[in-house]
Amino acid sequence: MDNTLRRTTLPDDSLALAENRADREHSLLALQELELRAGSPAPGRDAQWLAQVIHALDALETMLVTQYENSDDDDSILSAILRDQPRLHHRVVQLGRDYRDLHEAVSRLHTQLEASPPDKIHFAVVREQLDCLATDLRYQRAREADLIYEAFNVDLGAGD
């Protein structure tokens, strides 16, 4: 008798996977734009630099909201994992919490920067805060990719 668990498969062209990939790509592009703007020269261009950073931060915040909402949808890849892979329930739930927390951190920084006069901004401090957010987002993306791979490409009975 074959006692291995069958792998749950999701075709590469599925709508849920395509939507997840698109969301991840859009949030990565928004992050890269933010990093580009934050890394541009700031001294003597305080107001322009701040406006560009805020605009890019707004785009990232919007993409994170979209990604979170799409991942919470019943037809999403993460919802499929919840339905088909109960052993991964905790990790999916934690991923959702972490996305929410990341969005809240981006939103707080966005609000803080909008309320700050350009001549009172400490560019190095803002860049450090943005770097921490970028690191968190990249780590989150990697954990999500690992989770999706584990859910749909691993034969759990292979080593038994």
Image: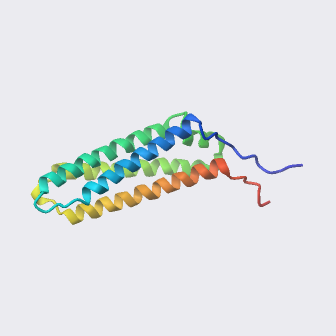
Picture coordinates of residue 58, whole percent (x, y): 28, 45
Q: Residue at x 18, y 53 (%)?
A: 50
Q: Nearer the viewer, residue 110 or 28?
A: 28
Picture coordinates of residue 120, whole percent (x, y): 12, 59
Q: Residue at x 24, y 46 (%)?
A: 55
Q: In terms of image quadrants, where is residue 138?
A: bottom left
Q: Nearer the viewer, residue 143 or 37?
A: 37
Total tally of numbered discs in the picture: 0
Q: In terms of image quadrants, where is residue 118?
A: bottom left
Query: On the rendered structure, is 64 left or right of 46?
Result: right
Query: On the rendered structure, is 64 left or right of 115?
Result: right
Q: For the C terminus, which image quadrant?
A: bottom right
Q: Residue at x 23, y 49 (%)?
A: 54
**Vertical arrangement, residue 29 with respect to residue 135, above or below:** above
Query: On the rendered structure, is 138 left or right of 1?
Result: left
Residue at the far right: name it. 1
Q: Residue at x 30, y 59 (%)?
A: 130
Q: Nearer the viewer, residue 45 or 5?
A: 45
Picture coordinates of residue 68, whole percent (x, y): 43, 42
Display coloring: rainbow
Q: In terms of image quadrants, where is residue 156?
A: bottom right
Picture coordinates of residue 94, whole percent (x, y): 50, 51
